[in-house]
């Protein structure tokens, strides 16, 4: 696992955008795995800027998002479908983009169909954020690693953390569809971003703790090409001095 510590959130976002840009330059028809949450917002803003100045072209790129609340209308401003259109898709020329369908009538069928779509393709670069409890996508702490795209009940701590985006905590959906740990681990490269002091503890746990489904992000240590970019606030400096 390669760990890059940037001075600020802005620098983290620029570094992440540079990695995405290099990926697309090397392979214009790259398949990207995309994430939501507040962390990748700076990355998306920087990619939009690079697109507008003609330094990146998404016309052959295909993307798959990690997850979506279930059930949720695409018109709901808190749906990840809405988030991606507002913060990225509506501003670039990305050719094909896929997100689990929060409006599907049958979540099991939707999970299977989404998993198959990704398996038929191959994700070149997967972007990840991380939950305070170590979740990646919506793979919550558990007794085992769930392999494929699945329907999940959200943790109370995730509901609390995401309540800041909703008018009332009771509005936060209690379920979601998420790529599984196996789905994520099949990506050729993984880029995990974490910013801010609230992520310092889980990042320390990720880098120094054991591999366990109690911290789903820990499985990334078994992947051969993971880059973690954090800013100073997420880095518990005194602990890093011990390690590096
Ligand atoms: C959400 C998403 C994750 C994201 C995480 C962290 O629940 N499902 O993909 O990484 O929360 O979000 P944030 O970046 O806002 O801290």
Image (tube, grey):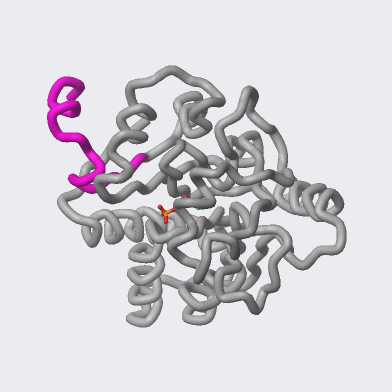
Residue 231 falls within the magenta-colored stretch: yes
Q: Is residue 170 above or below residue 48?
A: above
Residue 223 appears in the picture as rendered: no
Image side of residue 145 versus residue 156, left or right: right
- Frontmost residue, 189 versus 130: 130
Residue 121 appears in the picture as rendered: yes
- Frontmost residue, 6 versus 103: 103
Q: Would you identify the image quadrant in which residue 130 lies?
A: top left
Q: Is residue 140 above or below residue 80?
A: above
Which region shows up in magenta? 228-244
- Frontmost residue, 22 versus 99: 99
Residue at image x 53%, y 81%? Answer: 90
Residue at image x 45%, y 52%? Answer: 161
Image side of residue 91 versus residue 3, left or right: right
Residue at image x 18%, y 45%? Answer: 232
Residue 109 percent location from the top left of the image: 86, 52
**Outermost residue toward the top in this view:** 210
């Amino acid at each position: 696992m390669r760990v890059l510590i940037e001075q600020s959130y802005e620098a983290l976002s620029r570094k992440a955008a540079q990695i995405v840009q290099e990926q697309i330059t090397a392979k214009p028809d790259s398949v990207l795995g995309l994430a939501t949450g507040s962390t990748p917002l700076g990355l998306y803003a920087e990619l939009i800027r690079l697109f507008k100045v003609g330094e990146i072209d998404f016309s052959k790129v295909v993307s798959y998002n990690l997850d979506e609340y279930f059930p949720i209308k695409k018109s709901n401003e808190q749906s990840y479908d809405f988030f991606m259109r507002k913060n990225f898709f509506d501003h670039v020329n990305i050719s094909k983009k896929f997100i689990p369908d929060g409006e599907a009538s049958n979540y099991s069928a939707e999970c299977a169909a989404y998993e198959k779509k990704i398996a038929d393709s191959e994700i070149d670069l997967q972007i990840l954020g991380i939950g305070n409890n170590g979740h990646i996508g919506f793979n919550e702490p558990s007794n085992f690693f769930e392999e494929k795209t699945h329907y999940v009940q959200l943790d109370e701590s995730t509901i609390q953390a995401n309540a800041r985006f909703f008018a009332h905590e009771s509005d936060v959906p209690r379920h979601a569809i998420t790529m599984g740990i196996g789905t994520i681990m099949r990506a050729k490269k993984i880029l995990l971003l974490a910013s801010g002091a609230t992520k310092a503890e889980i990042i320390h746990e990720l880098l120094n703790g054991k591999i366990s489904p109690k911290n789903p992000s820990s499985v990334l240590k078994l992947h051969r090409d993971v880059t973690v970019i954090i800013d100073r606030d997420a880095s518990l400096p005194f602990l890093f001095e011990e390690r590096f």
